[in-house]
């Protein structure tokens, strides 16, 4: 089993996964960093101030504000951001 943290992944660990089928788990430091990053994104998404790519469209649509969605569990947050991006382009 290879534990991936916030630091670099070793060549040996990459080989273990790619060639020997070793499993991969996230280390506690990686999980803590993900939680911290998620909190930042949730705060930006809930803010009435537009934040590029979080509560706005992208590129030419960066000035288009997209209304926040209700709080979601971690896997659904990424989907919600993707839907916002599609909505900003008129695709959803």
Image (tube, grey):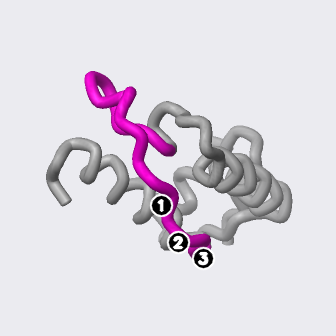
Above or below for 24 versus 29? below
In the picture of the structure, the residue carrying the numbered disc 3 is 73
Above or below for 19 versus 44? below
Q: Pointers 3 and 2 in contact (CB under 8 A)?
A: yes
Q: Quadrant of the N terminus?
A: bottom right
Indicate the position of residue 53 as horizontal and vertical percent values.
Answer: 45, 37
Left or right of 77, for residue 11: right
Q: Pointers 1 and 2 in contact (CB under 8 A)?
A: yes
Magenta segment, prevailing SS (helix, strand or loop): loop
Left or right of 15, for residue 48: right
Indicate the position of residue 68 as horizontal and vertical percent values.
Answer: 51, 57
**Observer able to see residue 35:** yes
Residue at 75% x, 60% y: name it: 35
- Let me know if residue 44 is in the magenta part: no
Above or below for 35 versus 75? above
Q: Which residues are magenta?
A: 55-73
Disc 3 and disc 2: Cα gap in Å? Answer: 6 Å
In the picture of the structure, the residue carrying the numbered disc 1 is 78
Residue lying at the far left of the rendered structure: 91
The local secondary structure at tag 3 comes to loop
- Let me know if residue 57 is in the magenta part: yes
Q: Residues within 10 Å of mark 1 (few under 14, many from 20)?
A: few
Indicate the position of residue 37 as horizontal and vertical percent values.
Answer: 71, 49
**Observer able to see residue 23:** no
Residue lying at the far front of the rendered structure: 48
Earlier sequence position, callout 1 versus callout 3: 3
Residue at 47% x, 60% y: name it: 78
């Amino acid at each position: 089993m290879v534990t991936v943290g916030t630091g670099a992944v070793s060549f040996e660990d990459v080989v273990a996964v790619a060639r020997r089928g070793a499993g991969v788990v996230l280390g506690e430091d990686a999980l803590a960093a993900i939680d911290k990053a998620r909190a930042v994104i949730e705060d930006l998404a809930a803010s009435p101030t537009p934040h590029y790519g979080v509560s706005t469209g992208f590129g030419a649509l960066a000035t288009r504000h997209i209304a926040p969605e209700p709080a979601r569990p971690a896997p659904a947050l990424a989907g919600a951001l993707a839907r916002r991006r599609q909505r900003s382009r008129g695709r959803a």
